[in-house]
Amino acid sequence: MKALLLIAHGSRKASSNQEVAELANKLSQQDSEFALVAHCFLELTTPKVPDSVAQLAAQGATEVVILPYFLAAGMHVSEDLPELLSQAQQNFPKVSFTLLEHLGAAEQMPSWILQQASR
Amino acid sequence: MKALLLIAHGSRKASSNQEVAELANKLSQQDSEFALVAHCFLELTTPKVPDSVAQLAAQGATEVVILPYFLAAGMHVSEDLPELLSQAQQNFPKVSFTLLEHLGAAEQMPSWILQQASR
């Protein structure tokens, strides 16, 4: 069973974190290859990465695709995420984890921006 | 003359800021309604917002569409940006400024994420 895990930075502002939760909820309602969708945060709020990984594994995920919901690759994306992935893989050796590039690196980003700016 | 201004947070990591500059460069090369494309940062690096606004005005922009290159609306998006917009409008009263919602609020975000996660 394939799962998508969004990892966001996390904010001191509850409504900002709620936006991420709502996005994950919308994603879970879309028709896609992902039977499970979850979200988690690096800092400042919960659920943290290990919490959501453990929950997905408990729900039966055999493959977890991790999308860093970041626009630019700062320290978090380039250093923290590979470390968290390594921990997840150690804790759940039977689950296959794939860490994608952060969203901002998407080739389509320029066209997405123009779509948004031209509405 | 219509301009697009991307506003990003800014990072301590130069390569992260460079990503934003490269994205603005790609956008400037795309065929769109925007004759000018610029980028700027809120913190930690330059160009800052007033620098880029002044440059666009000097280049002849009459309309500046501002896209907050943020995924979630934290304090920066909800408080700092409206204040910066107000300053820009005062400094350049003949230029029309439009502040868009941050990128993360795009209706298409769930489908963009699935595009990226399913590659």
Image (cartoon, coloured by chain):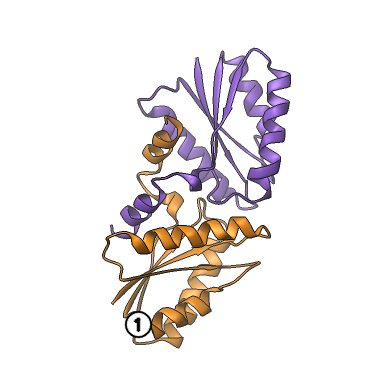
Chain colours: A purple, B orange
What amino acid does circle 1 point to? Val
Q: From the viewer's side, name the closer residue of B82 and A61.
A: A61
Which residue is labeled 1 in the image? B95
Q: From the viewer's side, name the closer residue of A58 and B6.
A: B6
Name the quadrant containing residue B32: bottom left
Residue at the image point whose x is 70% and y is 41% from the top: A80
Residue B41 image offset from top left, x and y in percent: 56, 67
Query: What kind of element bears circle 1?
Result: loop
Residue at the image point whose x is 51% and y is 59% from the top: B20
In the rendered structure, the answer to whether residue B94 lies left or right of residue A88 reads: left
Residue A61 visible in image:
no
In the rendered structure, the answer to whether residue B73 lies left or right of residue A109 reads: right
Residue A28 image offset from top left, x and y in percent: 44, 28
Quadrant showing the N terminus of chain B: bottom left
Residue at the image point whose x is 61% and y is 56% from the top: B15
Residue at the image point whose x is 49% and y is 19% from the top: A2
Q: From the viewer's side, name the closer residue of B81 and B14.
A: B14
> Compared to A13, does B62 lie above or below?
below
Residue B73 image offset from top left, x and y in percent: 52, 55
Q: Disc 1: which chain?
A: B
Quadrant showing the C terminus of chain B: top left
Residue B22 image offset from top left, x and y in percent: 48, 59
> Compared to B100, does A66 lie above or below?
above
Mark 1, residues whose alpha carbon is within 10 Å: few (<14), some, or many (≥20)?
A: many
Q: From the viewer's side, name the closer residue of A117 and B85.
A: A117
